[in-house]
Image (cartoon, rainbow, N blue to C red):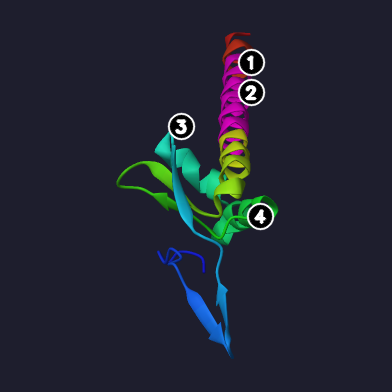
Amino acid sequence: QSGVYNPPTMVTFEQGPTLICAPEQHVRYVNVDINPELMKFVIGTAGYYFNAITRASGVSYIWFDKQMNRIEVYGPIWCLDNAEKRLTDRMTHIEWVNIVNKVKQFQVNSWSDESDDM
């Protein structure tokens, strides 16, 4: 559920004489080293990119902890590396897009300043 902090817990379901256990949940903390203002683009509208990364990597839950400036990833241990890679790739992509946009804006401003001189 988007926007509500609700990490998974260890759950065991009883179905007749058989116990069905949810995969063991582990947590990994991914440090955020980009501008916190850019995190909204990493997360996406209504959590779009976090949800996509959750499904694609096989983890059960991803949350951005603003206070600690880190991303929490919950899921089976064998899925955590995949999720972390996808998250760091997404952050890198957003950083590059931000840099390119700043360069383009600088070029537009420089061009308009030169035309004012003529």
Q: Earlier in the sequence, mark 2 or mark 1?
A: 2
In the rendered image, the vertical position of residue 3 relative to residue 28, given as above or below: below
Q: Secondary structure at mark 2?
A: helix
Pointer 4 with pointer 3, Cβ within 8 A: no
Which residue is under mark 3?
34
Callout in the foreground (4, 3): 4
Q: Position of residue 47 (x, y in %)?
A: 56, 58
Q: Amino acid at mark 3?
A: Ile
Q: Residue at x 58, y 40 (%)?
A: 81
- Check disc 4 and report its element: helix, strand or loop: helix
Label 3: element kind? loop
On screen, residue 30 versus residue 58, left or right, reads left
Which three-letter amino acid code belongs to the residue tagged 4? Ala
Q: Quadrant of residue 28?
A: top left
Q: Which is in the foreground here, disc 1 or disc 4?
A: 4
Q: CA distance from mark 3 to mark 2?
A: 20 Å
Q: Amino acid at mark 2?
A: Lys
Q: CA distance from mark 1 to mark 3?
A: 29 Å
Marking on residue 52: 4
Membership of 106 in magenta stretch? yes
Residue range highlighted in magenta: 90-110
Front: mark 4 or 2: 4
**Would you place residue 53 above or below residue 9 in this image?**
above
Neighbours of disc 1 within 10 Å: few (<14), some (14-19), many (20+):
few
Is residue 5 located in the magenta-colored stretch of the structure? no
Q: Quadrant of residue 112?
A: top right
Q: Earlier in the sequence, mark 1 or mark 3?
A: 3
Image location (x, y in percent) of residue 53: 63, 51
Give 95 or 57, whichever is nearer the viewer.
57
Q: Secondary structure at mark 1?
A: helix
**Residue that carries the numbered disc 2 in the rendered image:** 104
x then y, percent, for residue 59: 59, 55
